[in-house]
Amino acid sequence: MTTHPHSRMPFAMAARQALLAFIAAFFIVCSAYAGEADKAPEDKAAAEKAPADKPAAPVAVPLAELSAQAEAAAVNLREIATKSAADPALAEIDRELPALTREIDLRLRENLRIISQHASLELLRTIERNWRRFSSTLELWSSELEARTGNLGRNLARLDELQGTWKETLALATHEEAPAELVKRAETLLVSIERTRETVEAQRALALRLQSRVSAQEFRVTEAIDAIAQARDATLSQVLRRDSAPLWNRDLSAYREQIAADSQESSEVQWAALRAYLGNNGERVLIHGLVFVGFATLLYWARRRINKWAQHEPGLHRPALVFAWPIATAFLLAFIGSRWFYPEAPRLMWALVGVASLVPTVLVVRRLIAAYLRPLLYALLAMYFVDQIRSITASIELVPRVVFFVEMLAGLAFLLWYIRRMRTSPSEAAASDRSRALIRVALAAACAFFALTALANALGYLALANLAGNAVLRSMYVGLVLYALVEIIDALVIMALRVRPLRYLGMVQRHRELLRQRVRWALNAIALWLWALFALDRLAVRQRVIGAIRDVFTAEIAIGSISMSLADVLAFGLAVWASFLVSRLVRFVLEEEVYPHAHLKRGLPYAISQTVHYIVLVIGFFVAMAALGLDMTKFTILAGAFTVGVGFGLQNIFNNFVSGLILLFERPVQVGDVIQIGDTTGVVERIGIRASIVRTPSGSEIIVPNGKLISEQLVNWTFSDRQRGIEVPVSVVLGSDPQQVIGILESVAKDHPKLVNHPPAQALLTRMGPDWLGFELHAATDRIEDWLVVRSEVGVAMHKALTAQNITLR
């Protein structure tokens, strides 16, 4: 069948139109689906968000499940009632808050008076610590109340949910005419819910009231702390300005009634604060007392032991003086840690603790210093008592200022009397010229200090007088306590080195005094550092000084692409120094405690010690490089370049270093060996990293490169044992009996104390001449270093023995 070509055109056009319509329909459907897909998340989010905006309506419990659900709801109610019951913590806060509020009221009034008196920085710090104690207590209460209020709020929300559910359930049961038992069960449950709600709401109201009162007190405490901070800043800013009227312009009689009233109120406030603090911290006082009893028991035992030893060792007389007053020493040791036992204690308690610390200090130190210095010690104690009176009366108008002025004048008068007494006292002449000069300079400086401080106080420069006076006096008190502590700890160290288990250590038995001196040096350094920090803090410049030092040490210095600071350089030096120190310490312990008990072969301890030394130094070097802040990647590149340089230009040094390692591990030559290199004979004193030191019999020291000891031939006279063979030749005239001569020579060797018996000495006829016979005595000695002296002594003894037998020497 034949088809005309034009008959296909309508069919093709219809096919194309159908295809285009299908594609268009496909895109329309896809777009509609995409629109629905984009809208679905929004609808879903809106659906999820709707319940959050509006709580879901309560749903009634099906009647078939009412009994079971009622039982579960009753259990839930009991749980809520238990959690919402009266909280002992809230009861305690409700009970203690009124007393705390009254104490805050009293302290606020006292605060205002103290600040108006231009109090010292130290007193302001003490007061601020007390307020910090109040703040921490209130913050703890606030957090407890906040948690309690939140829990009660959540319990109310649960009750609302339960109440709504069971109201709907009761309505459903009534509408469906459910059995009377089910209706009554629902009504009873609703009554229980309402009763529980009343309890929870009452507890929540109490918590909210307490929270409001605690917040009000927190605000007052914060204001007090801010006022103290402002007073401290004002004091620092007015140090060199007159901040008060001159003392002679103040009429004390006008303040007589005010002083009496303020004194009574201040006394009541401080005693109330002390009673409250001791009542709340009774367990701390008990623990502190037990610590004191423990120290006293230890010190009584130490006194008995050290007094017994001091009878045979005069060097223990000074430590025995430290333990002469065990109770005083125990008081000092126990009260020195009062900051840990009594954090944020009231001002009156710190005054009592200070007295309890300084009085024992004086009792201990007075036995350790010269008699002519004791009046200074007693004067310092008297001034401390006056300072505590000044601290206690800080809130009374004009009293602390007048007391401080009188204290400075009294101190000046005492020093002038003491200087005059020293000039005529024979005890002062017994001191060395240097001690006498130092004492005179110190006394002159103290006189100037007291005079200037009293003058500044009188002229109205109260901030300056308080800052300088309190800083110097407190530094003196702390210095005295630190000196006593160093003496006590030093005496305890002496005791510890003489009792078990330390006395059984070899390094203690052989180096007891050296160890004690090192510990004493460390104690002195620590005490000096603590005293310096304390003095700077009392002068209110510690942060500034530390900041200035930090700025100097952290200033960057750029050298090319490398930048470093002085602190980096110092850290580098300290790391290197510490590596040497650690190396010495480790080798000391090894040599004193390990090697004597390990029974190692000769030379092995030295090899181990040197290896440890090198390892510690290498580790210390890398630590120092890291402290310097250098990039270790760049350092690795430099090390590679250095290795290439070693290969070309430092071959001999590198060869000697490797040879030294071979000597240490292979040990062909060891420290103490007698060796001979060429015509040189001597004892190996040291094997170093590059060369070894050999001491000759003449006393000279020869530095021999390690490579020479490895590559060249040498004679080691003591390689397998510590004996040195000696040969002594002798010649006698012909006609002497050879057997008699041999017997005499061997007898001389046998009787000589410096010759060993194994191997036995042997005399030989070695040469004969026309009119003489030649003999040699072969013997051995273990006096390697003195073998020449031994050979000489043996030769003298041979001559004497042969002459005594009428044998003529040739």
Image: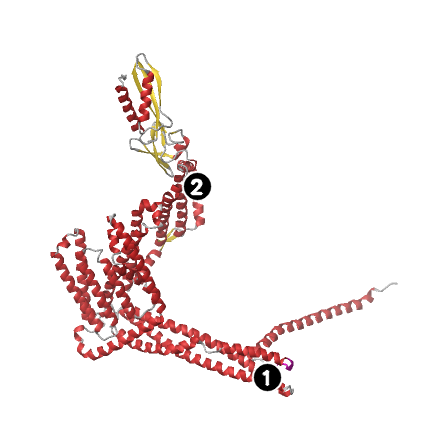
Q: Which of the two residues, 125 or 654, is positioned nearer the viewer here? A: 125
CA–CA distance between discs 2 and 1? 95 Å
User: Which quadrant holds residue 526?
Assistant: bottom left
Q: Which of the two residues, 111 or 518, is positioned nearer the viewer here? A: 518
User: Is 65 left, or right, of 580 in this rendering?
Assistant: right
Q: Is residue 58 magenta?
A: yes
Residue 777 visible? The answer is yes
Q: What's the residue at 25%, 48% (across, down)?
A: 313
1 over 255 or under it: above or below: above
Q: Which residues are drawn in magenta?
A: 57-64
Going by the picture, which residue comes out furthest to the left?
A: 424
Q: Is residue 738 magenta?
A: no
Label number found at residue 643: 2
- Quadrant that contains the C terminus: top left
- x and y percent of residue 451 in the render? 17, 65
- Quadrant that contains the N terminus: bottom right
Q: Secondary structure at mark 1?
A: helix
Amino acid at circle 2: Thr
